[in-house]
Image: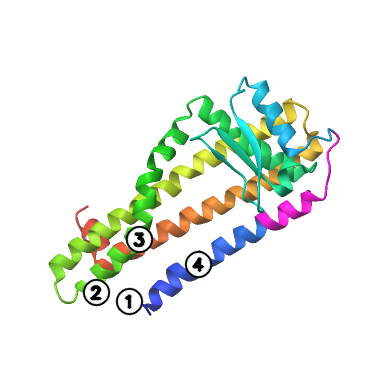
Amino acid sequence: MYFDMTYMLLVVLPGMVLSGGASWLVKSTFKKYERVGTQSGLTGAESARLMLERAGVTNCRIEPILGRMSDHYDPRDRTLRLSEPVYNARSISAIGVACHEAGHALQHAQGYKWLQMRSSMVPVTNLASKMSMPVLMIGMMMLSMAPVLGQWVVLAGVALFAAAVVFSVITLPVEWDASARAKTAMVNAGFVNQQEAAGASKVLNAAFLTYLASAIASIMTLLYYLHRSGLLRQLLSRR
């Protein structure tokens, strides 16, 4: 189980390539446009605040956070946290990322259903992510000794892992919509001109690819365990 070459070649290696490639792209794209300023001269924090105010959202706090690429919106306390290269920076990258996070705040304020669904899944997903792999491994080891019981344990592990997969898939429309809101707001409000907007879009599109790569890797892992346990064959034979 620990040295399954099929798992390494069909799941681990492609997953590493996808995740590594997406991570490299977002970092390199952010770094490129981090050096390019805008005519508006706004900082990331200022652009996010103006974007929210224009949409009538005034109950969202914006505060700095340590780290790089650690930007996020926390719906629990309605706080938008921007990293050091974004909060006080006056670059295309800073405005793009800040407005993207502001897009999440707008989703929250407007009751965007995909964000609500993702938020409601967080407690279950956190628990499932911790338990799924141990349960799956125990089930796989039991298959040769107690096939029936082992298959039920594997099924429980698959169900737990599937919750994490669903979460990663639901994240895709949430992130895409936040970027779409940011791209529109940046231009309409004059934070960036058309040329600068193209650069900001590249930063946001690269960031979205990291979520897409994560979702694909999760789906591939789920399919592997369904195949390894024989559950996939059973599911297909019933069709």
| Residue 25: x %, y % from top left | 66, 57
Q: Residues within 10 Å of mark 2 (few under 14, many from 20)?
A: some
| Residue 197: x %, y % from top left | 75, 38
**Residue at horizontal 35%, vertical 65%?**
224
Residue that mark 2 sits on: 141
Kind of residue at badge 2 = Met
| Residue 155: x %, y % from top left | 23, 59
Q: Which mark is residue 1?
A: 1
Query: Upstream in the sequence, badge 2 or badge 4?
Result: 4
Q: Is residue 43 above or below residue 163?
A: above
Kind of residue at badge 1 = Met
Magenta-colored stretch includes residue 4: no
Query: Upstream in the sequence, badge 1 or badge 2?
Result: 1
**Pointers 4 and 1 in contact (C-beta within 8 Å):** no
Which of the image's four quarters has the N terminus?
bottom left
Kind of residue at badge 4 = Pro
**Residue at horizontal 55%, vertical 62%?**
18
| Residue 173: x %, y % from top left | 50, 39
Q: Secondary structure at mark 2?
A: helix
Q: Please tell me whether mark 2 or mark 4 is closer to you in this view.
A: 2
Q: Secondary structure at mark 4?
A: helix
Q: Residues within 10 Å of mark 3 (few under 14, many from 20)?
A: some
Q: Which mark is residue 14?
A: 4
Q: Secondary structure at mark 1?
A: loop
223 vs 134, nearest the viewer: 134
Residue that mark 3 sits on: 223
Q: Which residues are magenta?
A: 26-39
